[in-house]
Amino acid sequence: MSSFTVSWTLLALLVIFLGSSVWVGVSLFLVGIAGFSLFTTAPPFSILSNILWNNTSSSTMMALPLFILMGEILFRSKISENLFKGLSPWMDFLPGRLIHVNIVACTLFAAVSGSSAATTATVGRITLPELYKRKYDKSLVIGSLAGAGTLGFLIPPSMVMLVYGIVAEVSIGKLFIAGIIPGIIIAIAFGGYTMVRCAINPDLAPLGDTRSTWSERFRTLPLLFPVITLIGMVLGSIYAGWATPTEAASVGVLGALFFAGISRSMDKETFWEAVLGAVKTSAMIMLIVVGASYLSVAVGYLGIPSKLTAFIGTLDLSNYQLMIILSIMYLILGCLLDGFSMIVMSLPLALPLIQAAGFDPLWFGIYLVIMIEVAQITPPVGFNLFVINGLVDEDIFKIALYALPSFVILLAVVALVTVYPKLVLILPNLMVR
């Protein structure tokens, strides 16, 4: 049977399973078993046992639940609430005023949570009631939150970067550092768009009755100390070469517990809620990663990646044409799948193509994370849209419409880092280790 027929058979099975509401991880296992059983003589369950052990016993994988736990602790403590109080006085003189708190708070919280959904939910619960009460424009408030919340995946530490690094065998420390400049560019672009909109139409962000003095602004700085300290502890230890990502995650958890304790917002019940939340999220991600690794091995046994790479090589595509095709593919996948599934399901096919074209796998990891950010605000399966839907009484597609400017900005940054890959690679190349 030809590789073309085999590929479409496996794809059809995957669509059937996913369309039947079978869990993504289970669907990947089932398709992998079908691929081994129908098209090879290899023992599917012996290979499965090896995959389960190899993908769950690595020290790198330990960083995943630790970073998730750190985010859960911050999510349930007063640290996130204090972040809003500390940022607000510093934003009230800019066009757009407190809408910038959405963007800056998401950027800072992303640097300690690693999750887009957690970033959006945490910041949204704090900022949306305040901004609604002050009669800020609803579309700009929701759109800025939806877009800035996606930075939870790009500003390190990042759950999807961990998954990509594990699957693609790329240095996770370098991935974390590579996401800093693109993340800052996106945050600045969101802020710039907000200022332009509000400069054109000041009624989008009413001035209000008061303006903070400089003394009031400086008095709020201690409220920002816990988040900034955690960022320095986690990223600083990785960048300086003092700790691996797993060790830095452990330090981050201890730091989050310490600050939650001194703010008196972490009791026994809240702690166990954070632990259970981390266990559930980690188990979900682990099931998807292991299932996708198993399917990747099945696809490799069938020779599909090498044959697809050879076929696309015969098309004589330029590098930019290849990236346009991959971007369209990821836009389509983003309408149907979550970010973790997008990574592990596409890499067996995409990674050989970009390596054959001469792209750096480290750069491709950041490109892919930004495309996953786009997927977070793309209906019908945009996770950030669902998170905001749970916070406000708005239709998913209306929220997606509000987030359309953020969608365009993210695609513009994708084009920018494709044309200028040094924006991604300059910091990792400066790393000692």
Image (cartoon, rainbow, N blue to C red):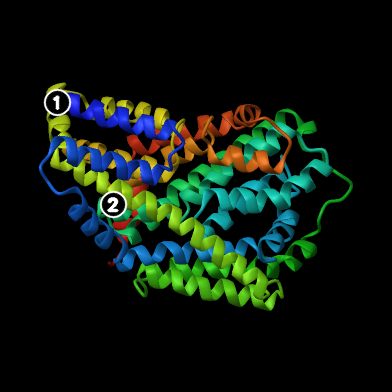
Residue at the far top in the pictured view: 315
State the residue at coordinates (55%, 74%).
255
Residue 94 visible, this angle:
no
Q: Secondary structure at mark 2?
A: helix
- Decide if residue 88 is on the left or right side of residue 122: right
Point out residue 305 in the picture as x, y percentages from the top left corner: 18, 36
Q: Is residue 317 above or below residue 259?
A: above
Which quadrant: the N terminus?
top left
Q: Residue 6, percent across and down?
A: 19, 29
Of the pair 419 and 309, the residue shown nearer to us: 309
Front-lying residue, 343 or 416: 343
Residue in view at x 79 percent, y 65 percent? 215
Q: Amino acid at mark 1?
A: Phe
Give SS at disc 1. helix
Q: Is residue 356 left or right of residue 104?
A: left
Residue plotted at (41% across, 27% down): 332
Q: In the image, which disc is placed on residue 264?
A: none
C-alpha span from label 2 to label 1: 24 Å
Q: Quadrant of the C terminus?
A: bottom left
Assess whether mark 1 and mark 2 are in contact (beta carbons under 8 angstroms).
Answer: no
| Visible residue check, residue 406 | yes
Label 2 amino acid? Val
Mark 2 highlights which residue?
A: 167
Using residue 395 as the reference point, say whether residue 185 is left or right of it.
left
**Residue 274 in picture, x, y percent from top left:** 59, 65
Percent x, y for residue 253? 51, 71
Give left or right: position of 407 versus 218.
Answer: left
Residue 11 sits in quarter: top left
Residue 228 image-quadrant placement: bottom right
Q: Give the class, few, some or many, for how many residues have Cα within 10 Å of label 1's Cα (few <14, many ≥20).
A: few
**Which residue was labeled with disc 1?**
311
